Amino acid sequence: MKLRFGTKRLEGLYCGTREQGTYPRDVVDAFFRRITSIKSAVDMRDLWALKGARLEKLRRQRNLYSMRLNVQWRLILEFEEAGQGTTVVVKSISKHYGG
């Protein structure tokens, strides 16, 4: 799948040009694992099959999904369908329920 970042901050985290200190080390490690999974996925079914990732559609949020990084943190994603296939937009890293 194609990948795009919704913010310069996330793109910088991925490219290594931004500090990783904003998030706990295990969250950053999980972020890179999830990005690798997204890039290697053929379609959305491959992401649904990652049981530990727990891909879920967000209620009250049109076309937004969350993918687990750890117990507290989630990767917020949007899927854009186009003629060339699906692009996954990484919108944010969010603390689940603010807890």
Image (cartoon, grey):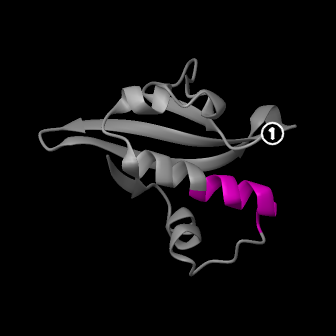
The stretch drawn in magenta includes residue 72: no
Callout 1 secondary element: loop
Q: Is 38 situated left or right of 24 in this image?
A: left
The image shows residue 26, relative to residue 95, as above or below, that is below
Q: Is 61 situated left or right of 80 in this image?
A: right
Which residue type does callout 1 highlight? Answer: Gln
Residue 40 lies, in percent from the top left, at 38, 48
Residue shown at 56%/81% (left/top)? 17
Residue 13 lies, in percent from the top left, at 59, 69
Magenta stretch: helix, strand or loop mostly: helix
Residue linked to disc 1: 72
The image shows residue 25, relative to residue 89, as above or below, that is below
Q: Few, some or many C-alpha atoms within 10 Å of disc 1 (few <14, some 14-19, many ≥20)? A: few
The magenta segment is 22-32
Q: Is 77 situated left or right of 42 in this image?
A: right
Residue shown at 39%/26% (left/top)? 45
